[in-house]
Image (spheres, coloured by chain):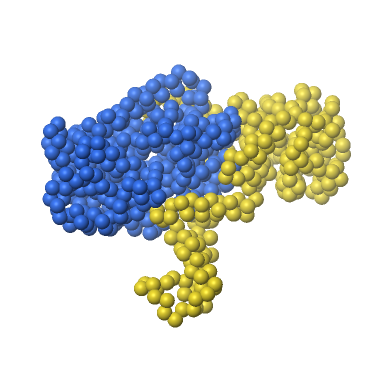
Amino acid sequence: MIEVNGKQLDEHVLHAKAEARKRAGLYDAHMLELLDRDIVEEVEEHVFSMIQVVYDLQRALEDSGCRLEPPADLSTGNEKKGRKSSFLRRLQTRFIRAVNEGYVQQQEKFNTFFTRSVDLSYRQLCGAMGGLDLGEAAAKRELWLSKRPQWDEETVEAISGQGNGLALLIGIPGVGLVEALQEAKRLFLAVDNSDVPVAEAQARFLPAWFNPQPVSLLHDVRAERLGLAVVAFPECLTGEELGDLFAWLGEKIAEGGVVLVALNRGSTDIFSGDAGFVRYWPLPFLEGLMRGRGFAAVKWQVGDQLFLKGEKGA
Amino acid sequence: MRVHQIVPRLDAGDAVSNQALCIHKLLTEWGFESRIFANGMDEFGKTYASYDQHYREFMDNKDDLVIFHLAIYCGSYEMFLESRNKKVVIYHNITPPEFYECFYPEAAHLCRLGKDLLPKLSAVDLALGDSDFNRREMVAAGFAEDKTGVLPINPPLDKLDGVEEDEAFLRQLGDGKVNLLFVGRVVPNKRVEDIIKLFYCYHRGINARSRLIVAGSLLNTYYSALLSMARRMGIQDRVHFLGKISDSRLKSCYLGSHYYSSMSEHEGFCVPLLEAFHFDLPVLAYSAGAVPETMGDAGVVFDEKDYGLLAELIDRMERDAFMRERLLDSQRLRLGDFASSLFESALKRSIGGLLGLPEAEPVGAAAAGGG
């Protein structure tokens, strides 16, 4: 029961909308599984791994004769003083003990900084983009992404007729293409690393997802009968991501299926400045990726828009 | 007459510390000699408190009054039990240990000790809870009902009003995204994972132009698990854990956010709900512990965590200005119940008898008081 200002809310309309989103594919099976997932499962699978390593380090040091903790009476005894013992004592009090004991209220400030640094390492290790701060770089990146061009009706129509079976969009060049594929009951998924077109699609109950690393999402979705993939902004993906994407497409797209990679160089003068965000991949590189995964690559043009088209052979 | 308060810690920004300081200020204004003793304190706390062993020199005076704040297990309870002062306990509640079991067994142990301590403190002149939920728990632990009462927390809103917001941070939050906020320690009973799930539904299904802000100190293992979960959901770039932040940044969080959500399954009062009321954020809160009491007939209260449905409700509020306005009106009205002047009279009503104040009600009448 939901109460608003102490009065029970009529939930029927909200239920209907939530159901409609499920039907439209905005909430997929994997997502619903994650909503049911208990946080304890995360702990069991990931979190204690670091603690175990630190615990093992402590044991190894103690087994080799290091006295990490001072004696209860704080006497120095026969212990030799020096840089090594000082280092070990600091290691014990400022790192090992902090990890083993987790949150200690008396060390709140320390723990905040400590967990932040753990978070940073975690993100670096996992290769996630972005960081803890809502920094200027993120804002700049979003502004830059929001300037990407939208494809016209002619291009949308031509693309909708390509390939067979369901279609995957990596990068959303305007809601028109998402809508056309959905109407033709061909849309499998549209994913983008800009939230602007995604939000526009969501407002029309179209299954579009935001992800800073769109390709990483594909390993969690169940793709069947996939016959068309459109990579609208390959320059927004890293080389590694493109490699992963084509490996995945090579497995999922059946014979006769089509991959279209937009060649935006030359038609994208608005992409200025920040080279870090833009990687115009050389044509031979993209052709190599396609051929390596069993696609015959040719250039293809609709209106002003140029593509590299790959057709899956037998 | 002297009044002593014993708190586990006296730190900046902590709800129990704020309560103790508020009482200290009022007692001083009423002409009493007031002292705070703490087992530990930060730099801020050092300007107000002494270490608790210094309380020993006042323990034998029968005319003094001692107020013991119970929020976590702390060894200073032994001095309280030995003391010959008139005795008051203020119970802020202790998290049930099972919440910590998986993440931090040592904290679970401390919670268990704290819970076990409660019945041992029952022989006092007056026992106050900062909510009726806490008061009932004291009665269940063996406190005489006619010696219990409610003294709601006086939210430190003036303090937040008095600081300048962090303008650069506020600008970053004002980039057109819908910001969902949670303020509080990132500990398991707050069920931050459920807020992330609600945000996941909203972000994935309804509005990708959104972010979740979590402001509060972090518990290592639990925090790591939350990060892992957010990453699994692909929303790690939209869930921002800020850690413990300054009042200036906290104010920016409230000013720059659009909704406040609490999924906590154990609260003795929950001050951030009132702070969110103060900064006109529509509040969505799970009905657990003292939360329904603090919310009153204001905001959104739910007893089932249907994330999809709650995400739709946020969307509705986003589009329905009339609904938002009615919600904010009722929240403003509710906030009035926690005004400083009311806290002062509630404190006078509850401990005034022990202090010998003429306008105080007899001990026990305070049981009906509070918000």
Residue A295, x across and y down, in percent:
82, 44
Residue A198, x across and y down, in percent:
64, 31
B254, A245: nearer the viewer: B254
Give the residue at x 40% y 50%. B43
- As drawn, which residue projects farthest toward the bottom? A78
Vertical comparison of B300 with A261: above or below: above
Q: Which chain is blue?
A: B
Give the residue at x 15% y 34%. B360
Which quadrant is home to the N terminus of chain B? top left
Q: Which chain is yellow?
A: A
Residue B70, x across and y down, in percent:
27, 49
Give the residue at x 48% y 24%. B317
Vertical comparison of A302 with B12: above or below: above
**Count of number-bearing discs:** 0
Residue A92 vs residue A154: left or right? left
Say whether residue A16 is visible.
no
Q: Quadrant of residue B333?
A: top left
Which quadrant is home to the C terminus of chain B? top left
Vertical comparison of B38 with A183: above or below: below
B137, A89: nearer the viewer: A89
Q: Quadrant of residue B156?
A: top left
Vertical comparison of A121 with B330: above or below: below
Residue B201 vs residue B100: left or right? right
Give the residue at x 14% y 52%. B61
Say whether residue B228 is visible.
yes
Residue B248, x across and y down, in percent:
47, 37
